[in-house]
Image: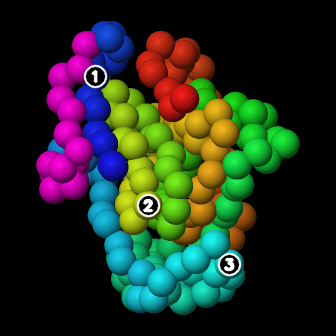
Amino acid sequence: MSQLTIFHDKHPDSIEFQSTVHNQIASQLAQVGVRFEQWEAAFAITKTTSHEDILDAYQRDITRLKAQGGYLTVDVISLSKGHPDAASMRQKFLFEHTHSEDEVRFFVEGQGLFCLHIGEQVYQVLCQQGDLISVPAMTPHWFDMGSDPQFTAIRLFNNAQGWVAQSTDNPIAERFPLLG
């Protein structure tokens, strides 16, 4: 179940707001410029569905987002439980960083935790199957895929090279809860 938890950035043990209701999550995030949607596939997705078939199943929403956000490329990324490089891959995004373009992810399966540091608050968004999140360019954030991740996600980019994480050098991510 999707979840939004909001903390004051100086008080990681004190929850200011929490909800698992999609409309409440979307409303809270919209107030700080973050898009949060739920999508439905045009046909059933199974473990054997190819990346091309996944893109076809969500083509209507992908086309809409590309037109609205100027996204040029789209791909699918998958990670299976027990992946030998999972721990090192997890560490790549557990520090507060920004990107020069939006970070757009749609979870076809599995989950991921986006932690957005906006003003004096930290918005932890647990995205699960069917959730789309668009983190605006230059928004300080970190991402946790969990200790034994399993997910498939569609990614949209403004440029063909993708984005590069630029550290903010703020150790804030070390103080907030992560996925197990």
Residue at x 45% of width, y 88% of height:
43
Query: At which x and y percent is residue 32?
Result: 24, 44
Q: Which mark is residue 48?
A: 3
Residue at x 38% of width, y 30% of height:
117
Number of the front mark, 1 or 3: 3
Query: At which x and y percent is residue 50?
Result: 68, 81
Q: Is residue 73 magenta?
A: no
Q: Which mark is residue 7?
A: 1
Q: CA distance from mark 1 to mark 3?
A: 39 Å
Number of the front mark, 2 or 3: 3
- Identify which residue, 41 or 158, lies in the foreground: 41
Going from the N terminus, do you reach mark 1 or mark 3 first? 1
Q: Is residue 63 above or below residue 139?
A: below
**Side (left or right) of 21 relative to 61:** left
Q: CA distance from mark 2 to mark 1?
A: 24 Å
- Residue 84 showing in the rendered view: yes
- Identify which residue, 132 or 98, lies in the foreground: 132
Query: Could you say whether the residue bearing mark 1 is in a helix, strand or loop?
Result: strand
Give the amino acid type for the residue marked by disc 3 in the picture: Thr
Which span of residues is magenta-colored? 14-27
Q: Is residue 95 above or below residue 74?
A: above
The quarter of the displayed image where residue 123 is located: top left
Query: At which x and y percent is residue 44?
Result: 48, 84
Residue at x 21% of width, y 55% of height:
22
Crowd class of label 3 (few under 14; some 14 to 19; many from 20; radius 10 Å)? few
**Side (left or right) of 104 relative to 122:** right
- Residue 102 showing in the rendered view: no
Query: Could you say whether the residue bearing mark 2 is in a helix, strand or loop?
Result: loop
Q: Write down the residue under mark 2.
A: 129
Determine whether label 2 and label 1 are within 8 Å by CB. no
Give the amino acid type for the residue marked by disc 2 in the picture: Gln
- Identify which residue, 37 or 83, lies in the foreground: 83
